[in-house]
């Protein structure tokens, strides 16, 4: 590893007018968001556009997406500490920060989305071990603890902790456990990232969802896209500060990994489509697709959103050597992959709910297809979560030693 | 930071000493002891709640495990589509107009003749909603009924998504509406559900429980029988204990060809339908 003077210099975000404007912008996002969230708490979910026919919408989409986009933390930790690709170690701290931002965003989102936020703690006390959603909740909780433990050593390195050497010592002790935490994090993450897909995949009454490929596609897309988000954050921080964050060769390796991951995801997706809509199609699935194509721009959002933006564009940006070496192309690819993830989660959630269940033994009755487009207040709370994630990243980059002593 | 590692910085080495291992082992042991103490044991802030859960509803196994299994037989041949059942239910259970627990649907047989399908909650013995609820807010009672604990529900709406029969409603707002079906179709016998929880048909559980306590038999004595069954002007609905082979409901199932909704899903519903005479 090169140890040029540039890289040894402590990384700091400068307090510049632009930075202050950025903070002002984030405050506006938070204000809009907090206002919307308070409106929801006062009035209830009645003011959203969700209904008994489509009880999940934009918020669940954001929830699933932010967990998927936070997957860089466990993927890169596993690559470095379990598979021993130690060259990638300089990116770990940033990846953990991005993961922390993603997972806490998801929890914030869920808190607004559930009907009784005052009972958010019930899954921890009233266990239903048969419920995949319970398993996801517990895994996310445990994984958030792992992320905090992984990150504690970085936090205690800050000046603030000069006055508590005991805490710093404890932090360094925790740091020694990182490889163990990486193993635990990998297990827990593989479990809940795929279980989020299983949340849909096990619902046997809805032919659009009921398939074993659902968990596989969720976990693969998360593994492939998550690290790319970390790469994009690293490049953007570099543009903002003009200082090196993570060595470029590291970022290039990670983007290549993401590119290969996306191709694997694309391959599974292709076979899923072939099996579900062609070779193994059932009347239920066929009519579900027919209804979706009739009522919604499903085909367009699938091909343009999930396949083109989500797989093809980023795979080209990440794998073609010319683009791989170009930071702008890598960021473009990462943003494209993020949009692809969000489109996929949206199509699965909302698309699946648009197709009503069918239970009548007669020949004509059908429940009306669902309709849904997020209400302004839903966008408002979405802005809250995005603003929150950006603030975590900004403050983390400002206060924490993300890019020093990485070799330790 | 520690400079001594510089020489081997390209390797990831476990820098654990014996005392570290001991610390980890001690922490692990401590956690194992602390976990039960803090969740169900004397130190837990949730101890009593958890204890309540353990003593509470049927933990494992599905459906009816006790001496009763409440079920309903609905004759599609007799139903005239008057919607009295829906109205009586709306009044008795104080249900929000527009999202009834008990729906009546005009349908056609393959021959093109109209019949009416009415659908309460089917009280599946393999209930998807019970499986997916992350907090056991919806569960099986010993008598096979799928019931809701409104005080436990967190309002995640997964059960609503999972129900194959569209039988669950969410309380999107605090109720302030005036019930149009009161008093013409009955008086509310249960409280309105709070904002933010799921609700559904209970087979008038309050009547069953208070009736049994008085020595009455649900399905025979009107006071202990669901409102929809009592009000049906053509007697299309029969309610009773499916575990008692002599109950009217069991007799009907034994003597007439019946069908159940989406039997292919293996939900094992407690509601049986007698098809129209001409067949489906």
Image: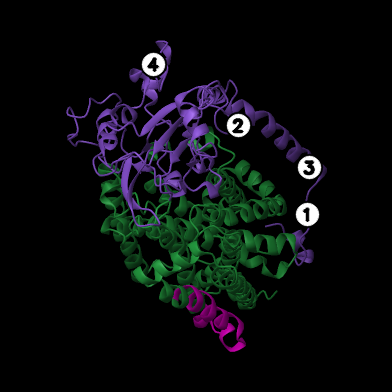
Chain colours: A green, B purple
Residue at the location (40% across, 71% down)? A293
Q: Which residue is mark 1?
A: B14
Distance from the alpha carbon under mark 4 to that under mark 2: 27 Å
In the depicted structure, whether residue A363 falls above or below residue B171: below
Q: Earlier in the sequence, mark 3 or mark 2?
A: 3
Q: Which mark is residue B211?
A: 4
Ranked by sequence position, the earlier of labels 2 and 1 is 1
The lab-note entry on whether marks 4 and 1 share a chain reads: yes
Name the side, left or right, on which A336 lies relative to A176: left
What element does badge 1 sit on? Answer: loop
Mark before the other along the chain sequence, 4 or 2: 2
Give the residue number, with chain letter if any, for mark 2.
Answer: B60
Mark 3 or mark 2, whichever is nearer to me: 2
Q: Percent position (x, y) of residue A281? A: 55, 67
What residue range appears in magenta?
A: A305-330
User: Please, what secondary structure does the residue beneath circle 2 have?
Assistant: loop
Q: Is residue A321 magenta?
A: yes
Task: Please give the residue where the numbered disc 3 appears in the rendered image.
Answer: B21
Q: Is residue A182 visible?
A: yes
Report in which chain the residue with disc 4 lies: B
Alpha carbons under labels 3 and 1: distance apart: 11 Å
Say which of B210 and B17 sits in front: B210
Chain letter of the residue carrying label 2: B
Image quadrant assignment for residue A385:
bottom left
What whole-number distance in Å separates the C-alpha atoms at marks 3 and 4? 63 Å
Classify the position of the N terminus of chain A by image quarter. bottom right
Residue drawn at x 51%, y 49% as measured from the top left = A160
| Separation of marks 4 and 1 at Cα, in angstroms | 68 Å
If the image is split into quadrants, where does the C terminus of chain A sit? bottom right
Chain letter of mark 3 equals B
| Up/down of A222 relative to B42, above or below | below
């Amino acid at each position: 590893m090169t140890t040029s003077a540039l890289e040894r210099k402590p990384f700091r975000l400068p307090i510049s007018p632009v930075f202050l404007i950025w903070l002002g912008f984030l405050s506006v996002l938070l204000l809009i968001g907090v206002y919307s969230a308070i409106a929801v708490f006062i009035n209830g979910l009645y003011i959203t556009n969700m209904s008994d026919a489509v009880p999940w919408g934009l918020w669940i989409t954001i929830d699933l997406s932010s967990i998927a986009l936070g997957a860089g933390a466990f993927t890169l930790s596993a690559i470095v500490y379990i598979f021993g690709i130690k060259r990638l170690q300089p990116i770990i701290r940033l990846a953990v920060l991005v993961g922390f931002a993603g997972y806490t965003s998801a929890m914030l989102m869920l808190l607004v989305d559930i009907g009784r936020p005052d009972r958010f703690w019930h899954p921890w006390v009233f266990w239903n071990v048969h419920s995949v959603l319970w398993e996801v909740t517990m895994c996310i909780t445990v994984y958030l603890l792992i992320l905090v433990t992984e990150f504690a050593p970085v936090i205690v390195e800050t000046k603030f902790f000069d006055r508590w050497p005991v805490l710093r010592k404890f932090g360094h002790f925790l740091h020694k456990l990182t490889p163990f935490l990486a193993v635990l994090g990998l297990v827990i993450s593989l479990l809940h990232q795929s279980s989020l897909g299983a949340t849909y995949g096990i619902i046997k009454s809805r032919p659009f969802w009921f398939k074993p490929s659902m968990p596989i596609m969720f976990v693969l897309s998360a593994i492939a896209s998550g690290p790319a988000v970390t790469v994009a954050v690293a490049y953007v921080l570099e543009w903002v500060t003009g200082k090196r964050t993570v060595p470029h060769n590291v970022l290039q390796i990670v983007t290549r990994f993401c590119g290969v991951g996306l191709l694997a995801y694309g391959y599974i997706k292709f076979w899923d489509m072939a099996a579900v809509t062609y070779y193994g199609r059932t009347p239920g699935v066929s009519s579900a697709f027919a209804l979706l194509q009739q009522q919604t721009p499903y085909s367009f959002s699938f091909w343009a959103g999930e396949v083109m933006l989500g797989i093809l564009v980023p795979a080209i940006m990440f794998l073609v050597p010319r683009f791989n070496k170009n930071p702008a192309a890598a960021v473009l690819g990462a943003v494209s992959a993020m949009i692809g993830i969000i489109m996929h989660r949206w199509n699965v959630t909302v698309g699946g709910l648009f197709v009503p269940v069918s239970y009548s033994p007669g020949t004509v009755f059908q429940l009306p297809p669902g309709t849904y487009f997020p209400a302004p207040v839903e966008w408002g709370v979405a802005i809250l979560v995005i603003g929150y994630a950006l603030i975590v990243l900004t403050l983390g980059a400002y206060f924490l030693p993300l890019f020093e002593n990485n070799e330790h | 930071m520690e400079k001594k590692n510089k020489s081997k910085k390209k390797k990831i080495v476990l820098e654990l000493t014996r005392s570290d291992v001991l610390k980890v082992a001690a922490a692990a042991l401590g956690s194992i002891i602390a976990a039960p103490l803090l969740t169900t044991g004397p130190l837990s802030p949730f101890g009593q709640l958890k204890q309540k859960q353990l003593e509470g509803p049927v933990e494992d196994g599905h459906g009816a495990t006790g001496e009763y299994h409440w079920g309903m037989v609905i004759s599609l041949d007799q139903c005239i589509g008057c919607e009295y059942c829906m109205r009586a239910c709306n009044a008795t259970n104080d249900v929000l107009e527009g999202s009834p627990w008990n729906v009546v649907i005009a349908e056609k047989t393959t021959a093109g003749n109209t019949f009416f399908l009415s659908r309460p909650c089917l009280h599946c013995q393999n209930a998807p909603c019970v499986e997916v609820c992350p907090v056991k807010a919806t569960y099986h009672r010993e008598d096979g009924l799928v019931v809701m604990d409104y005080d436990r529900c967190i309002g995640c709406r997964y059960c609503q998504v999972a129900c194959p029969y569209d039988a669950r409603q969410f309380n999107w707002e605090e109720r302030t509406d005036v019930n149009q079906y009161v008093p013409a179709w009955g008086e509310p016998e249960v409280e309105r559900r709070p904002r933010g929880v799921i609700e559904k048909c209970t087979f008038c559980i309050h009547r069953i429980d208070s009736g049994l306590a008085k020595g009455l038999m649900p399905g025979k004595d009107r006071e202990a029988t669901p409102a929809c069954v009592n009000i049906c002007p053509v007697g299309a609905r029969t309610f009773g204990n499916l575990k008692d082979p002599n109950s009217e409901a069991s007799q009907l199932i034994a003597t007439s060809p019946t069908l159940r909704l989406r039997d292919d899903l293996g939900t094992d519903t407690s509601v049986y339908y007698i098809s129209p005479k001409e067949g489906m």
